[in-house]
Image (spheres, grey):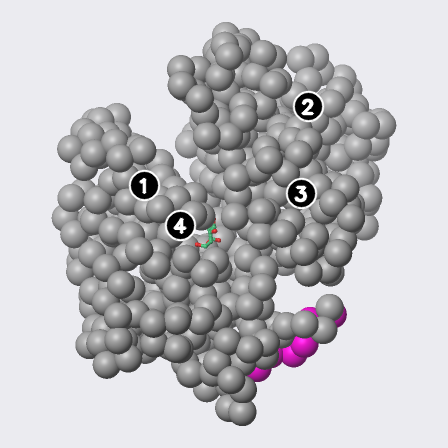
Amino acid sequence: MLWLSPIYPSPQDDNGYDISDYQGVDPVFGTLPEFDALLTEVHRRGMRLVMDLVVNHTSDKHPWFTESRSAVDSPQRDWYWWRPARDGFEVGTPGAEPTNWVSLFSGSAWQLDDATGEYYLHLFSRTQPDLNWENAQVRQAVYTMMRWWLDRGVDGFRMDVINFISKDVALPDGPRLPDGLLGDGSSSYISGPRVHEFLQEMHREVFAEHAERLLVVGEMPRVTVEDAVLFTDPARGEVDMVFQFEHVGLDHGLSKWDHRPLRLTDLKASLGRWQAALAEKGWNSLYWNNHDQPRVVSRFGDDGRYRVESAKLLGTVLHLHRGTPYVYQGEELGMTNAPFQAIDDYRDIESLNHYAYEIGVRRTPPDQVLAALWVKSRDNARTPVQWDPSAHAGFTTGTPWIPVNPNRTEINAAAATADPSSVWHHYRRLIKLRHHEPVVAVGDFTMLLPDDERVYAFIRRLEDVALLVVANFSPAKADAAVPDAAEWAVSELVLGNYPDVVEGLRLRPWEARIYRRTLAS
Ligand code: GLC
């Protein structure tokens, strides 16, 4: 199944997550007939295609917003969140914003619109006004658009920040942030009061008659595991699975820009808790990477000496969990973070706004901000896919919109497909294993060695078949001290990331192995 990030017409202020027309294709990507041809070819190959659905907000260039902002008495005024200045404040003065909420892309979440003297809410950039889901016409317009894509043949949706669509209509101020300037409004919009109701309505209106053939995954920043059970319980008719963010927040300090090294024990505790919580009801999605996260081999692996081994190890660990694994473009090649030196190299609005805010408002030294971007910027994952070693990595013969990673000469698809020991071939083996071994897809999951700082170990079991996965997240040798180690060590080695086999459960640097046993029932 292929998931496309937004391809709709867009001013591209947030890489297409600011949509100005939900029912078209941006010329930068092609045309609607070309999209239809893609869909046909995908289906002909026995694959499916999932679209990104961005309906928490539109672009400020969307006709709905143009109409809404045109006058206070516009019939579509209420399609967005408009509010007057705070009581006792003059419009446009500091502190006059209707609430103290910070935007997820820095600064206030409210933008004054001079034409009518009111403010509109934008949880993301000021070019991404939030839709008002309280308004039934908004919901119906969204459902109509979704049905239009389903009728065209698409196979489901990845729903952008879908747990933000219901807001506490009182819009209360949030607790002040450590820097004292703005407040955190997230308790008023994360999994807000009517979110389950809205998703159930969407399910009835859009998905119900196609439910068996569709995949619906909700992107849900800061979703709790308790809420995820509710969102994904099939009996409730909401979504099939959620993208949660706990494991990709473990190297955050006070904010994502404040880096602290990952502790393996935290990773095991987090992923293990999600595995356990969604074991009976609901379902997990599994991912290391997407267009918002730094490259995992640079982040949780070793993108130097052990790049290939650690990329394979990370793939092995993730794909052997219970849930639906996602592979982000280039992850299967072991692509690494971008070596950007200067702010001019960056394109991502979150990164650029953060830089401007830190330099302009907080007077942070530029080097310090660049060091944080180097590690966490979303642009790390957005450099062009490396197809071959040529100048722009085979991505374009023109000038790419963001620099290509210079390591294209070594890391590229042409080299990876030609080399049987590549990360790419390893990912194919992992996917094949899931297709052939039912225990990978539906077996239960038991985490082992929760306190071990270097070895990640777990068991999958389905009836009399058991798999043991052991992975050494370190550049030194490590013993996998699992129960029944002697029996496991002589059982069938299904897959590993080293070319040769050594006896025992002493793992080499960044080594991962999968063993299989048939147990007496
Ligand atoms: C989601 C997208 C991200 C985008 C944001 C606003 O988190 O994945 O790329 O910037 O929503 O739409």
Q: Which residue is mark 3?
A: 373
Ligand 1 contact, mark 4 (Cβ < 8 Å): yes
Q: Amino acid at mark 2?
A: Arg
- Residue 174 belongs to the span the image colors magenta: yes
Q: Which residue is mark 1?
A: 7
Disc 4 and disc 2 in contact, CB within 8 angstroms: no
Mark 1, secondary structure of its residue = loop
- Looking at the image, the residue that sits furthest to the bottom is 88
Question: Which quarter of the figure is the C terminus placed in?
Answer: top right
Q: Residues within 10 Å of mark 4 (few under 14, many from 20)?
A: many
- The Cα–Cα distance between marks 1 and 3, rounded to whole angstroms, is 26 Å
Which quadrant of the figure has residue 419?
Answer: top right
Viewed as shown, does residue 437 lie left or right of 340? left
Q: Earlier in the sequence, mark 1 or mark 3?
A: 1
- The Cα–Cα distance between marks 1 and 4, rounded to whole angstroms, is 9 Å
- Looking at the image, the residue that sits furthest to the top is 418
Q: Residues within 10 Å of mark 1 (few under 14, many from 20)?
A: many
> Magenta segment, which residues?
171-178
The residue depicted at 58 percent of the width and 60 percent of the height is 106
Q: Residues within 10 Å of mark 3 (few under 14, many from 20)?
A: many
Q: Amino acid at mark 3?
A: Leu
Disc 1 and disc 2 in contact, CB within 8 angstroms: no
* Circle on res. 307: 2
- The Cα–Cα distance between marks 4 and 3, rounded to whole angstroms, is 20 Å
- Could one spot residue 410 in this view of the protein? yes
- Residue 75 belongs to the span the image colors magenta: no
Q: Earlier in the sequence, mark 2 or mark 3?
A: 2
* Circle on res. 17: 4
- The Cα–Cα distance between marks 1 and 2, rounded to whole angstroms, is 32 Å
Which quadrant of the figure has residue 288?
Answer: top right
Residue 350: x and y, percent? Answer: 55, 50
